[in-house]
């Protein structure tokens, strides 16, 4: 008698807006890093991502959102930086909430897989 195989259902989540990807795990991690470091440059470094790519992601997210998720602060005595807006903080929380719900659903469905 053959041993019954177990399968695992893997799911990745992207939130799209009409003109393209709005949020995905990488962008959410970038937002978290901006919130933590107060800087797009430092957030990109933590992810081993170029500043240019990080800035493009921030621009895309801000463009696709109803209100900006990241606010750039101009330099001054202590230099510039960036911060998450309230909408940015909500976007991070909402993404993880959706991801958790989808993962729970996928886990439940995994038990039903028989090939």
Image (cartoon, helix red, strand yellow):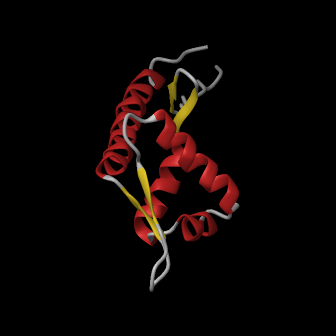
Pinpoint residue 114: horizontal percent, then vertical percent: 55, 15
Q: Is residue 114 above or below residue 6?
A: above
The front one of 72 and 108 is 72
Pinpoint residue 70: horizontal percent, then vertical percent: 43, 53
Q: Is residue 109 visible?
A: yes
Q: Is residue 9 above or below residue 43?
A: above
Pinpoint residue 19: horizontal percent, then vertical percent: 58, 24
Q: Residue furthest bottom?
A: 77
Write down the quadrant of residue 109 in the picture: top left
The residue at the point 48 percent across, 63 percent down is 33
Which quarter shows the N terminus? Answer: top right
The front one of 73 and 98 is 73
Q: Is residue 79 above or below residue 26?
A: below
The residue at the point 59 percent across, 47 percent down is 57
Which quarter shows the C terminus? Answer: top right
Q: Is residue 26 visible?
A: no
Left or right of residue 106, residue 48 in this image: right
How many numbered discs, if any? 0
The front one of 27 and 3 is 27
The residue at the point 54 percent across, 28 percent down is 9
Q: Residue furthest top?
A: 115
The residue at the point 46 percent across, 79 percent down is 76
Pinpoint residue 89: horizontal percent, then vertical percent: 33, 51
């Amino acid at each position: 008698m053959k041993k019954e195989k177990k399968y695992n259902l893997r799911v990745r989540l992207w939130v799209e807006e009409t003109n393209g990807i709005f949020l995905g795990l990488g962008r959410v991690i970038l937002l978290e890093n901006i919130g933590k470091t107060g800087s797009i440059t430092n957030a990109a470094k933590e992810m081993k991502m170029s500043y240019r790519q990080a800035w493009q992601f921030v621009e895309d997210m801000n463009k696709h959102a109803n209100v900006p998720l990241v606010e750039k602060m101009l330099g001054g005595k202590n230099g510039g930086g960036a911060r998450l807006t309230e909408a940015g903080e909500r976007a991070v929380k909402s993404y993880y909430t959706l991801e958790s719900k989808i993962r729970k659903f996928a886990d439940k469905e995994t038990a039903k897989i028989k090939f």
